[in-house]
Image (spheres, rainbow, N blue to C red):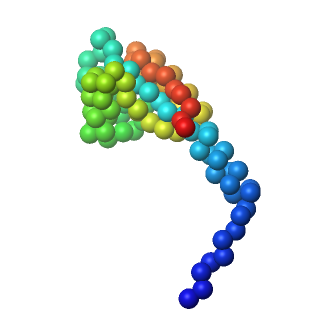
Amino acid sequence: MAEAPLTNDPQTEVRSRTQQADMYSVLLFDDTENVREYVVICLMQVFAHSAVLAYKIMMEADRAGKALAEVEEETLARRHCKQLQDFGLLASIEKSV
């Protein structure tokens, strides 16, 4: 059985690196202002996370001081970070490595 030939396509490699480089992490930070249930509801509304996932993210922020809420392209990350902040949550974005 013949194997498919390997290609060294620089365009594919550049697109792949660009796509990875353009991803941003939305971080949620622990705060003393908001109750846990509210944070879970906000995560569900902003990211459409399930209740289970939203709860896990909230608990990670509660225990560790911050949690990764989502990894996405920059425009969405900025929009979602702003939405979390508008809900009164502490959030930021940073470029993923």
Residue depicted at x 56% and y 32%: 95
In this orientation, which residue lies closer to the viewer: 9 or 84?
9
- Residue 3: which quarter of the image? bottom right
73 displayed left or right of 36:
right
**The C terminus is located in which quarter?**
top right
Q: Position of residue 94 (x, y in %)?
A: 53, 28
Residue 27 vs 5, above or below: the answer is: above
66 displayed left or right of 52:
right
Residue depicted at x 68% and y 51%: 15
- Residue 78: which quarter of the image? top right
- Residue 74: which quarter of the image? top right
Residue 27 appears in the figure: yes
Q: Position of residue 44 (x, y in %)?
A: 35, 34
Residue 41 vs 9, above or below: the answer is: above
In this orientation, which residue lies closer to the viewer: 16 or 46?
16
Residue 14 vs 87, above or below: the answer is: below
42 displayed left or right of 86:
left
Q: Of all residues shown, which one is farthest toward the top?
A: 33
Residue depicted at x 38% and y 21%: 29
**The N terminus is located in which quarter?**
bottom right
Q: Position of residue 38 (x, y in %)?
A: 29, 22
